[in-house]
Amino acid sequence: MAGRGLSKGEKMNETIYVGNLPYESTEAELRELCEAFGEVFSVKIIKDFETGQPRGFGFCTFISEGSAFKAIMELDGRKFQERVLKVSQAKPRQGPGR
């Protein structure tokens, strides 16, 4: 079930990864979904660099770690707009970015 986003003993940060988003989802909809778990600092749906089309995942940064943890526990595996979300703690970006 839900709650697979953290490893035992892993330190939590405030940013979560939200995967398997419908391509039609907006940042406003993602913000609304996440605000049920606490105050949201920022939301970003990632888009393809060349086409500008959504890539089906995004990030949500909460004001508090507790809100982020609660969101992971409640949203991972939950259905959103006919898709099952994959939610976990965001990992630091590795390698060259654009």
Image (tube, helix red, strand yellow):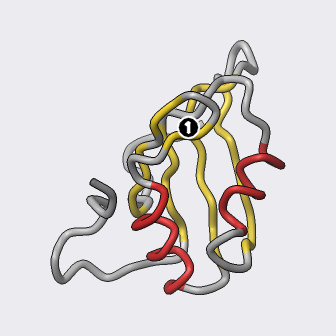
Residue at horizontal 57 percent and vertical 28 percent from the top? 82
Query: Which residue is situated farthest in the left direction here?
Result: 8
Query: Which residue is situated farthest in the right direction here?
Result: 28
29 vs 54, nearest the viewer? 29
Residue at horizontal 16 percent and vertical 77 percent from the top? 8
Left or right of residue 83, residue 98 in this image: right
Q: How many marks?
A: 1
Measured from the top left, where is residue 61 in percent x and y?
63, 68
Whether 57 is drawn above or below 63: the answer is above
Whether 37 is drawn above or below 2: the answer is below
Measured from the top left, where is residue 88 in percent x and y?
39, 57
Residue at horizontal 27 percent and vertical 54 percent from the top? 1
Left or right of residue 7, residue 6 in this image: right
- Which amino acid type corresponds to the residue marked 1 in the rendered image? Phe
Residue at horizontal 75 percent and vertical 20 percent from the top? 52
8 vs 97, nearest the viewer? 8
Q: Name the image quarter holding the C terminus.
A: top right
Whether 75 is drawn above or below 27: the answer is below
Measured from the top left, where is residue 70 in percent x and y?
48, 75
Measured from the top left, where is residue 55 in percent x and y?
59, 26
CA neighbours of label 1 inside 10 A, class few (<14), some (14 to 19), many (20+): many
Left or right of residue 20, residue 26 in this image: right
Whether 36 is drawn above or below 18: the answer is below
**Mark 1: which secondary structure?**
strand
Q: Give the residue pinned by disc 1.
A: 57
38 vs 1, nearest the viewer? 1
